[in-house]
Amino acid sequence: MRALVIDDSRTMRRIIAGILRPLGFDTVEAADGQEALDALEDGLDVELACIDWNMPNLDGLGFVTAVRKDGRWRDVTLMMITTESEQGQIVRALAAGAHEYVIKPFTPDAIRDKLQLLGLVGLQESA
Amino acid sequence: MSITGESFSYVAELVRRRSGIVLESGKEYLVEGRLLPLARAAAADDVDAYLRALRTAPHPARLELVVDALTTNETSWFRDAQPFQALVEHVVPEVRRLAEPGPLRVWSAACSSGQEPYSIAMALADVVPAGKLEILATDLSAEMLERARAARYSQLEVNRGLPATMLVRHFARVGADWEVAPALRNQVTFRRHNLLELPPPGGPFDVVFLRNVLIYFDLATKQDVLRRVQRAMRPGGYLVLGAAETTLGIDDTWERVPVGRGAVYRHEARRAA
């Protein structure tokens, strides 16, 4: 499986990619929504996109809206990972087509839990 | 089925060094119960074999897993997911078919900081009509009950296993925290209770969640707790145990009912015809 990690912070991209790889993802990084959209336009095939909200050029909400408008990317799972924590913002992102929403700060377990909910990571037995 | 003294001392020393938690002898069953899923995941024959391999190659990440398994007071929402799916798809339709048209009574035993009873309420929000669900949540710890009753959770806590759609539907932002909505809170009653004592009032229960509790007890106590729980249940009611737990080999008067990837339990003597 491949994941596109979209965040304007290089450190944050590295953290998220570092959590995704042991869960079985190859990761590709993009520094903003436009860069990510361009990569998809160029034929990059991903199962998952992890999306920051506040970014230059095209923000996370704009990216989600653009991806949901295009049937080619129907199967891409969209997960927001952002400091935006207002209830109204979460509702907006879900209404725009995001499948899940993680609020920063988060732990690696939180990402794994969400990917399990989304069916992208198998349920492990936990003690 | 028990682990060797050597294995136990190794784990007890590891946990003491890393967490300060002391596992006194007599807690072998706890070590075994908590580490069994890790042993299975590593394809080891049993916990002893798993620990032997660990001692030969004490990889830091694996040591961490062992310590976590023995010290984490797990508080995820919809923990293990499967029991909640079984509740909605199998257990509730089944007990509703059998029971008289009163409220559905659920007992969440050892509810810790409240994630389990609130998860049950969320799972059943579209399944059981409002006013027809009564959840009793009990714990031994007054401090945990206080937290559960407050129904207020940090950002880190709501990130754990709670679908975003449930978060926005059933919680309200309060400062930096999230608070469970009154509609949900009203369905849950909290009460202090020791599983070794008489069952709490509020029954008989259609469903009992008793997850990751039996592992703390020795065999005789497990049997005693199961007997007490059974007496608090309605005929045909269902018992839900933790993912690594079973009644098999403890009390064979319970029937294991496979549902999806897991199983729930029903007592044979009190099964409704």
Image (cartoon, coloured by chain):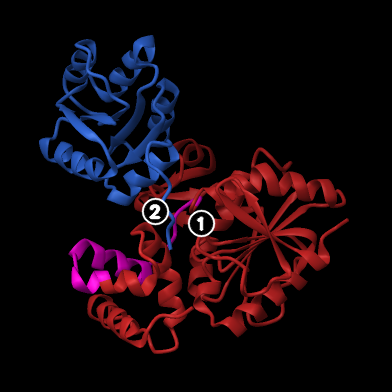
Chain colours: A blue, B red
Q: Which residue is mark 1?
A: B115
Circle on res. B272: none
Residue name at image x 50 percent, y 44 percent: B171
**Mark 2: amino acid:** Glu
> Which residues, given as a range, are shown in magenta?
B53-78
| Whole-percent x, y for residue A77 in the image | 37, 27
Residue name at image x 24 percent, y 22 percent: A59
| Whole-percent x, y for residue B138 in the image | 61, 69
Q: Which residue is mark 2?
A: B157
Q: Are marks 1 and 2 in contact (CB under 8 Å)?
A: yes
**Mark 1: amino acid:** Gln
Asked where in the image residue B214 lies, by quadrant, the reply is bottom right
Q: Nearer the viewer, residue A35 or B148?
A: A35
Residue A70 visible (yes or no): no
Question: Where is A96 relative to B62, above or below?
Answer: above
Question: Where is B220 relative to B97, above or below?
Answer: below
Asked if the stretch drawn in magenta spans residue B268, the answer is no
Residue A81 visible (yes or no): yes
Instruction: Determine the residue located farthest toward the left in the rendered image.
Output: A10
Compared across the picture, whether B218 is left or right of A108 comes to right
Residues beneath discs 1 and 2 located on the same chain: yes
| Whole-percent x, y for residue B106 in the image | 69, 58
Asked where in the image residue B23 lies, by quadrant, the reply is bottom left
Q: Nearer the viewer, residue A94 or B179?
A: A94
